[in-house]
Image (tube, helix red, strand yellow):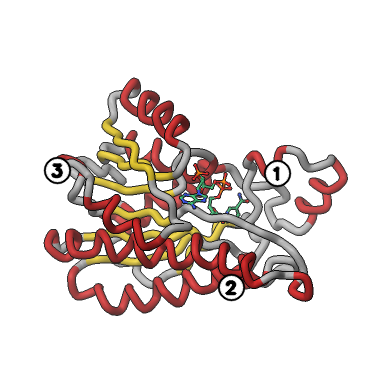
Amino acid sequence: MFRLDGKTALVTGASQGIGRAVAKLLAAQGAKVVVAARSEDKLAVLCSEIEAAGGQALALRLDLSQPESVGDQIATLPEEFSDIGILVNNAGITDDTLLARMKLEQWERVLTTNLTGTFVVTKSVLRGMVRQRWGRIISVSSVVGMMGNPGQANYAASKAGLIGFSKSVAKELGSRSITCNVVAPGFIETAMTADLPEKGREELEAGIALRRLGSVDDIAAAVLYLASDEGAYVTGHVLNVSGGLYI
Ligand SMILES: NC(=O)c1ccc[n+]([C@@H]2O[C@H](COP(=O)([O-])OP(=O)(O)OC[C@H]3O[C@@H](n4cnc5c(N)ncnc54)[C@H](OP(=O)(O)O)[C@@H]3O)[C@@H](O)[C@H]2O)c1
């Protein structure tokens, strides 16, 4: 179950956190994985780890804040990694402040990386999926895209945008056996949450039905399901992986 042998995956934002865990799990399940981000040194370490475990990986420098250049960069992939069947749009940033103080530049920076970035990467791999008559597009949104969050109007808009985008693409491409889904994490243990003071952490946990933060592996497992053949009949879906933070 959940094997990905013979498939090639592209994971954006793979240099750390959730994307790194996703890339490692997809590789462990047999996929060749293109790991994309700006931090080439971190990507090189990840590729070595995947290869040491018997997998195949290739680093791709991709800067989603420069969407015009993304298509050309993806076109440079060598033939053995160019048939992308699984795309995980995971790269994302925050730039938080209350709306009254938010500058246009902050709005645009977050929307460009999180939403326009997903648009350009997805377009760049689409033709290959149509040719294969098989594809899995999975975008990492956030429960904040559905709940809203003070100080995150830009981020929440970008994450809600991914949901509308994915539902539309699901309808456009379903006839080609290409599925398009969203994974919406809640609070996940990452570098960002590691520094929380004990009290802040307890308050966070009190709002979560399962009374704990999620792990990057919780998210990777959800992505794997949607990427696999076992997830073939699920499309246009938003899978909340939030421990019941959002129900
Ligand atoms: N952590 C959470 O609690 C949580 C909750 C809900 C949703 N999410 C979502 O899950 C995804 C991953 O989150 P995370 O916590 O793992 O974040 P993270 O640790 O900050 O990692 C973000 C990733 O995105 C990449 N990235 C940022 N800007 C980029 C750009 N301009 N071009 C290309 N890549 C870029 C970063 O790589 P480089 O810096 O090397 O480019 C990094 O690999 C994000 O979309 C986030 O919104 C996270």
Mark 2 in CB contact with mark 1 (< 8 angstroms): no
Q: Nearer the viewer, mark 2 or mark 1?
A: 2
Residue type of the residue flagged with mark 3 = Glu
Q: Residues within 10 Å of mark 2 (few under 14, many from 20)?
A: some
Residue type of the residue flagged with mark 1 = Thr
Instruction: Indicate which disc, 2 or 1, sits on the residue closer to the N terminus.
Output: 2
Instruction: Indicate which disc, 2 or 3, sits on the residue closer to the N terminus.
Output: 3
> For numbered disc 3, what is the local secondary structure?
helix
* Picture coordinates of residue 216, whole percent (x, y): 54, 43
In three-dimensional space, the C-alpha distance between marks 1 and 3, rounded to whole angstroms, equals 39 Å
The quarter of the rendered structure image containing the C terminus is: bottom right
Residue positioned 41% across, 56% down in the render: 89
Q: What residue did someone put label 2 on?
A: 157
Residue positioned 44% across, 67% down in the render: 116
Q: Residues within 10 Å of mark 1 (few under 14, many from 20)?
A: few
Q: Nearer the viewer, residue 151 or 185?
A: 151
Residue positioned 24% across, 64% down in the render: 126
> Is residue 209 in view?
yes
Q: What residue did someone put label 1 on?
A: 193
Is 185 on the left or on the right of 102, as rendered? left
Q: Nearer the viewer, mark 1 or mark 3?
A: 3
Q: Which mark is residue 79?
A: 3
> For numbered disc 1, what is the local secondary structure?
helix
The quarter of the rendered structure image containing the N terminus is: top left
